[in-house]
Each structure stands twice: as structure tokens, then as C-alpha cells.
Amino acid sequence: MQLSNGSDLGQRLTNLRLQHSDLDSAIRALEEGGPANELQIKRLKKRKLQLKDEIVRIEDVLTPDIIA
């Protein structure tokens, strides 16, 4: 992941958080909708975890290490 500056990373982070939230809503809707396609739910959950991992990586880059 090569982005030129903190602004680009911040924008990417916002986009990823929105996608993560959208997936959460989609998963909840499928689960509440009765007999759901379990394979589809598993795929959405896997994608949600991938997004979360990327969010954490970007947050680590944007948040400076503080040595106490």
C-alpha cells in the first residue's frame, strides 16, 4: 500500500471505515432475514475482517509511537 501522504491515508481510512460499517449492516440484515445463505454471510464476514486489518494498519501509520 503506497499512498503519498497523511491526507491520502486519512481519506482511505474514512472510506474503509464506511465499507466496514456497510458490511456490518449487510451481515445483520442477512442474519435477521430468516434462513440466510451461510456461505454469503461467511464471505462478508471475511471481507469485514480484511477491512478491519487494513484499518488497523493505516491507524498505526497515522498514529505516532509515543515512548513514555
Image (tube, rainbow, N blue to C red):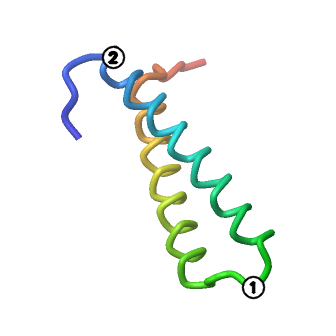
Label 1 crowd (10 A; few <14 / some 14-19 / many >=20): few
The circle on residue 6 is 2
Kindly indicate the quadrant of the structure image that contains residue 10.
Answer: top left
User: Is residue 32 placed above or below 39 in the rendered structure?
Assistant: above
Q: Residue at x 60, y 18 (%)?
A: 68
The circle on residue 50 is none
Q: Residue at x 53, y 19 (%)?
A: 66
User: Residue 53, percent across and down?
Assistant: 47, 51
User: Is residue 46 placed above or below 2 in the rendered structure?
Assistant: below
Q: Residue at x 19, y 21 (%)?
A: 4
User: Residue 2, percent across and down?
Assistant: 19, 34
Horizontally, residue 12 falls left or right of residue 26, namely left
User: Residue 36, percent across and down?
Assistant: 68, 81
Q: Nearer the viewer, residue 2 or 63?
A: 2
Quarter of the figure with the N terminus: top left
Name the amino acid type tagged 2.
Gly
Horizontally, residue 29 falls left or right of residue 50, namely right
- First reached walking from the N terminus: tag 1 or tag 2: 2
Question: Helix or strand or loop: what does disc 1 sit on?
Answer: loop
User: Residue 45, percent across and down?
Assistant: 57, 67
The circle on residue 35 is 1
